[in-house]
Amino acid sequence: LLLPLQAQREQVFQTQTQTTLENVKRALLGFAQSQGRLPCPATAASNGMEQPLGGGSCTQQMGFLPAATLGVTPTDANGFVIDGWNNRIRYAVTQTNAGGALTPDFTTAGVMATVGMAALTPNIRVCATSAVAGCTAAINLTNNAAAVIYSIGATGALGAGGADETENLNAVANVDVVLVSHDPTSAVGSEFDHTVVWLSPFVLYNAMIQAGQLH
């Protein structure tokens, strides 16, 4: 009896997490439509607010979803949006600077419109593996994500279970543009239970065009 009950609970948590991630994607599009940019990630000490406030060059390219800035729920007591297992949702945003501005194109208000769609170069890559041979500019699920939002799953509190989870937990500021997404696996040493979604630049551009923020 316990095993089926646990499986049902995990399914509920997974569904809740997927719903939260989709809501976050819509919130990011709404933010871009109103602000002319994407928000920066929150840091562990920012109480769910983007860092720096107002965008520009982000304090770190990979961090936590800035739930307090976006006004999304559910959150923990510190203002960070959480998944079904009460782990904080992670967020990465491109920091490319194709237009020659002093700050990155996608997180600085008005710069995307100044640079123009044809010249923008979002560069976050999502691969099916962290192995170098299987994750290149030519072999990937996407190599031009504007932003990536992901849950670290049921085992998030235990840390990385394998190389692919380690890749997603690598929060080196402003240098790591690779994330991994694939079906869950419980193979010893290669455990993976992250749920990863990304924001296509073309969906972002379309939303911003509709709001008059891009042309």
Image: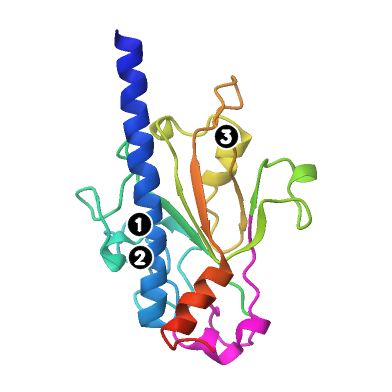
Which residue position is annotated with label 1?
23
Which percent across, then down, holds residue 15? Answer: 36, 39
Q: Compute the Cα span from label 3 to label 1.
A: 21 Å
User: As displayed, is residue 74 above or below residue 96?
Assistant: above
Q: Compute the Cα span from label 3 to label 2.
A: 26 Å
Which percent across, then down, holds residue 117? Answer: 61, 82
Q: Residue at (36%, 27%) from the top-left corner?
A: 10
- Please tell me whether residue 175 belongs to the stretch shown in magenta: no
Kindly state the secondary structure of the residue where label 3 is placed: loop
Which residue position is annotated with label 3?
183
The answer to whether 158 appears left or right of 85 in the picture is right
- Please tell me whether residue 107 belongs to the stretch shown in magenta: yes
Is any part of residue 170 visible from this angle?
yes
Which percent across, then down, holds residue 87? Answer: 34, 41
Q: Which residues are magenta?
A: 98-125
N-terminal of the pair, mark 3 or mark 1, is 1
Mark 2 is surrounded, within 10 Å at the Cα level, by few (under 14), some (14 to 19) or many (20 or more) other residues, namely some
Q: Residue at (61%, 73%) from the top-left corner?
A: 96
Q: Residue at (55%, 22%) from the top-left corner?
A: 186
Q: Nearer the viewer, residue 213 or 163?
A: 213
Q: Residue at (49%, 39%) from the top-left corner?
A: 194
Q: Nearer the viewer, residue 31 or 39?
A: 31
Kindly state the secondary structure of the residue where label 1 is placed: helix
Question: What kind of residue is marked 2?
Answer: Ala
Question: What kind of residue is marked 3?
Answer: Asp
Which residue position is annotated with label 2?
27
* Quadrant assignment for the N terminus: top left
Determine the main secondary structure of the stretch shown in magenta: loop
User: As displayed, is residue 194 above or below residue 74?
Assistant: above
Mark drawn on residue 45: none
